[in-house]
Image: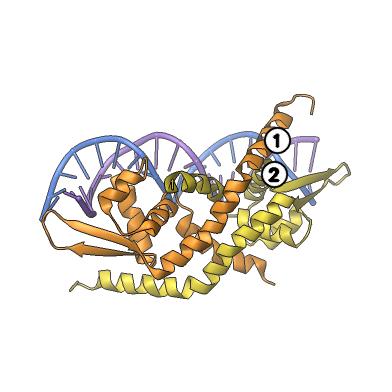
Chain colours: A yellow, B orange, C blue, D purple
DNA sequence: CTGCATCCAGCTGGATACTG
DNA sequence: CAGTATCCAGCTGGATGCAG
């Protein structure tokens, strides 16, 4: 079994959802269609630039769709595609894993750091 | 439901497995315990430095264990912890997603790029 | 309201040389 | 064999200003 090759392909997906904001955008659009400003307001700390960049990337990959209304002021709505919804489900597995293991990881880190700070190894 | 908060925690996990090499290391150690050089040989393109950095990070988080044999020349064996095995399973969901959607993503990208290269929008 | 352009700081990871 | 140390290029993403 070519694990390396398979993980390489997995990395392509991780590159997609593994950046700083994509997962949150996907999760929020999973609730329902939303507008640019709505997303910006709901994602704490994201800049206008990064929201645009993130949405463009997801749109390019067929994860979200972008609907522009030719009105003034502009109105643009973003939604999850079908593929985007399946991606959200897959990512959810990792979210669940994270929720059930974060405490354990924190403990492991603390133990590791204590071991290595300790002068008498 | 606080999606944003949950995704933030999910990001902590993505930060762990979302770097360039962690997923491959986890996958290979999922086969069986391996030595440093063995991993280095099996992961195409990884440098000594990055294998060390990756293994240290995973060890710190309790994903892998490191067993040193006090012999000459040195012998160090790495294995997946129980938690590491569960992480591999969770990550596998995303691997499977990637495998079944990469073609679709490539198509979406090509379509998007064609749309945007087209001068008559 | 939505989005692009520019500039820039910090982090990631690659190359290389050295050590027990 | 299994690291550590140093240096550095490139990418990510934040701040800000401008535009339709």
Frontmost residue, C4 versus B5: B5
Within 10 Å of the Cα at label 1, are there few (<14), some (14-19), or many (20+) other Cα atoms? some
Report which residue position mark 2 lands on.
Answer: A62
Q: Is residue B115 above or below residue A12?
A: above
Residue at 17% across / 63% down in the picture?
B69
**Is C5 left, or right, of A68 in this rendering?**
left
Provide the chain ID for the residue under circle 2: A
Query: Does residue B104 appear in this view?
Result: yes
Frontmost residue, B46 versus D17: B46
Residue B75: percent from left, percent from top: 19, 57
- Give the total number of marks visible in the rendering: 2
Quarter holding residue B61: bottom left
Query: Does residue A46 appear in this view?
Result: no
Question: Which residue is outermost to the front?
Answer: A1
Question: Which residue is outermost to the top?
Answer: B119
Residue D14: percent from left, percent from top: 56, 53
Residue at 12% across / 59% down in the picture?
B71
Frontmost residue, A54 versus B20: B20
SS category of the residue bearing label 1: helix
Q: Residue B112 — which label?
A: 1
Tell whether label 2 touches label 1 (CB within 8 Å): yes
């Amino acid at each position: 079994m070519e694990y390396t090759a398979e993980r390489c392909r997995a990395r392509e997906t991780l590159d997609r959802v593994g950046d700083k904001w994509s997962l949150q955008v996907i999760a929020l659009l999973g609730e329902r269609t939303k507008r640019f400003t709505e997303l910006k307001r709901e994602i704490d700390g994201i800049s206008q630039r990064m929201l645009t960049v993130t949405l463009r990337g997801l749109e390019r990959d067929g994860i979200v769709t972008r609907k522009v209304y030719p009105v003034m002021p502009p109105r643009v709505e973003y939604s999850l595609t079908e593929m985007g919804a399946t991606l959200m489900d897959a990512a959810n597995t990792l979210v669940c894993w994270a929720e059930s293991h974060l405490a354990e990881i924190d403990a492991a880190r603390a133990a590791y750091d204590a071991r290595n700070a300790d002068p008498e190894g």
